[in-house]
Amino acid sequence: MTKNTLKQAGYKSTKPRQQVLKILQVGHTPLSAKTIYKKTRNINLASIYRTLKLLTELNIIQQEFINNKNYYYLANKKHHHIICKNCGHLECIPCNHSFKIKNFSQINHQVMLTGLCNKCAVHN
């Protein structure tokens, strides 16, 4: 699917793009650009940022702003995350919002949810 999406948009499926996608597939959690960089082999940080920007623009990956940082994840459907304020445990929350606003297209939104996970709530 992603190779076809890249090809249809006029882009090649390069090794850096494949490697970033593979890291996001294996991770199953949102990752920062620096974390992705640390997991790659022979790809500079600027290329990581360019790849993430392109994959986000093509809606191949999703971007979310968590704790003042951009995180990226691979998902077929847009969803959000809730993060524990104490330990950082993160869980996915489905998103069923779709917006149809006159004079706008390609509308994106972000929701930041925080709380205490059950484990931390017991210890507080």
Image (tube, helix red, strand yellow):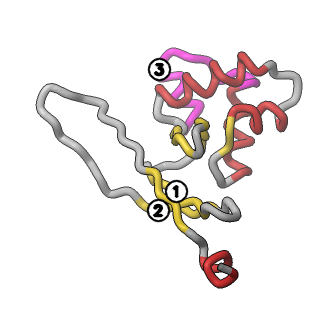
- Is residue 19 left or right of 2 when viewed as pictured? right
Q: Amino acid at mark 1?
A: His
- Residue most extreme to the right: 42
Stretch of the chain drawn in magenta: 1-16
Q: From what the image shows, is residue 120 above or below residue 86?
A: below
In this view, the residue in front, 16 or 45, is: 45
The residue that mark 3 highlights is: 9
Labels 2 and 1 touching (C-beta < 8 A): yes
Q: Amino acid at mark 3?
A: Ala
57 shown above or below 78: above
Instruction: Tell me what residue is drawn at x 84 percent, y 34 percent.
Output: 38
The residue to which callout 1 is attached is: 81
Which residue occupies the extreme left position in the image?
Answer: 102
- Residue identified by numbered label 2: 93
Please provide percent x and percent y for residue 73: 59, 44
Sequence-wise, the earlier of marks 3 and 1 is 3
Answer above or below: position of 65 versus 119. above
Kindly identify which numbered label has been placed on residue 95. Answer: none
* Residue at horizontal 68 percent and vertical 47 percent from the top: 25
Q: Nearer the viewer, residue 52 or 124?
A: 124
